[in-house]
Image (cartoon, helix red, strand yellow):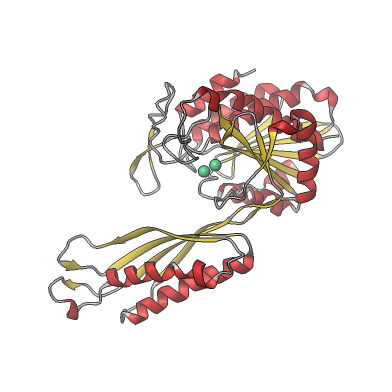
Amino acid sequence: MTDLRELYLDLHRHPELSLQEFRTAGVLADALRPLGYEVTTEVGGTGVVGVLRNGDGPVVLLRADIDALPVEEKTGLEYASTARATNSDGENVPVAHACGHDMHATCLIGAAAELARTREEWSGTLLAVFQPAEELGCGARNMVEDGLFDRFGRPDVVLAQHVGPLPAGMIAHGSGPLMAASDAVEVTLFGRGGHGSAPETAVDPVLMAAHAVVRLQGIVSREVSPSERAVVTIGKVQAGTKANVIPETAELGISIRTFNEHTRDIVRNAVERIVRAEAAASGAPREPEFDWHGSTPVLVSDPDATATTVAAFTRHFGQERLIPGAVVNASEDVGVFGTAAGVPTVFWFFGGIDFAARQPGPVAMNHSPEFAPDIEPTLTTGVDALVVAARAWLA
Ligand code: ZN
Ligand code: ZN
């Protein structure tokens, strides 16, 4: 049996970017095989699936994501990542497990081991799914499209968890929509280049982009109902190379978060309408182009299935270790599994911060260079939560 702490340290020191989780997949497959699971790699790219058939009964899918982020780790930990990799744009970037997916993968190996060890006590089938590319929002879909359910069986429930900057040892749960739908669009605005001293001969895409950025702020404040949640962030503005050259084009990278289809349609349509109108207002020689990508549906933790799971958590952990989880505007693609299989998804957060062992002060969030969970009691809690949740569903 793999030492879980060693496994975590190994994954943490060797993070890999989304769609490049080759070493990670190998390490996880090697940890899973001796536990008695039928292990298949390269499912939907770099996904790993372990199947434990243990008689008649429900099929339970436990999912962990395994990818890291292009972030330079600044936790100061002795086991901090110093890894670098080439991203999809060909740039050399630092890589770190700044979202804690190394913790998720380690917890799932721990749970897989415990459920295999105690197989006399339950019956059914366990699917341990290690999903790549969560940070791109495409990993779950890739696995489903690679025949996940046809090849390994259709689950009755999908169970998954995420570590966060909550007190370690605690489980935060919620019911219904928990995490936002995410859409991203790359916009290209077309102007006409020219000399910076002669703007009358050009169409300036920089001014066009600037107006669009300001006008887009009006979507959430003026077009979405105040009772709805939505976010529009323009995280990328790029144009030009030199102060005295009016460029040909400008690019905007826009991220959208919503919680239902109606609001999502309003926001997406408004983005296109406003950008087109600003281009027209500037006399653009060409219509703007929109490249929509990276779409993740809203994550819904099924109310009935969540109630069943949380009741099991309450029996195991006690009410004092459970807290209500906040709805967050970040996104998660695990719901794709449940939706594709037509079964409930249950999702919860578990704490990763041992506040007693840390200096007082602000705690870094996921995706921060300073984010890393304290290994214990985070690891034990994450393993226990998966085991307890799975046992709530297995016969
Ligand atoms: Zn993340
Ligand atoms: Zn994450």
In the rendered image, the residue lying farthest to the front is 360
Left or right, 386 with respect to 164, comes to right
Identify the image quadrant of residue 287: bottom left
Left or right, 299 with respect to 266, comes to right
Residue at position x 41%, y 41% in the image: 70
Residue at position x 38%, y 36% in the image: 72
In this view, 267 is above or below 17? below
Residue at position x 75%, y 53% in the image: 342
Looking at the rendered structure, the number of numbered marks drawn on it comes to 0
| Quadrant including the C terminus | top right
Identify the image quadrant of residue 2: top right
| Quadrant including the N terminus | top right
Q: Is residue 54 visible?
A: yes
Question: x and y percent of residue 214 in the render?
Answer: 38, 68
Question: x and y percent of residue 117 in the render?
Answer: 75, 21
Question: x and y percent of residue 174 in the render?
Answer: 69, 46
Task: Decide which of 118, 163 is in the foreground and name it.
Answer: 163
Q: Is residue 155 visible?
A: no
In this view, 231 is above or below 179? below
Task: Decide which of 8, 132 is in the foreground and name it.
Answer: 8
Residue at position x 63%, y 69% in the image: 262
Question: x and y percent of residue 76 in the render?
Answer: 39, 26
Which quarter of the rendered image does ligand 2 occupy?
Answer: top right
Left or right, 134 with respect to 176, comes to left
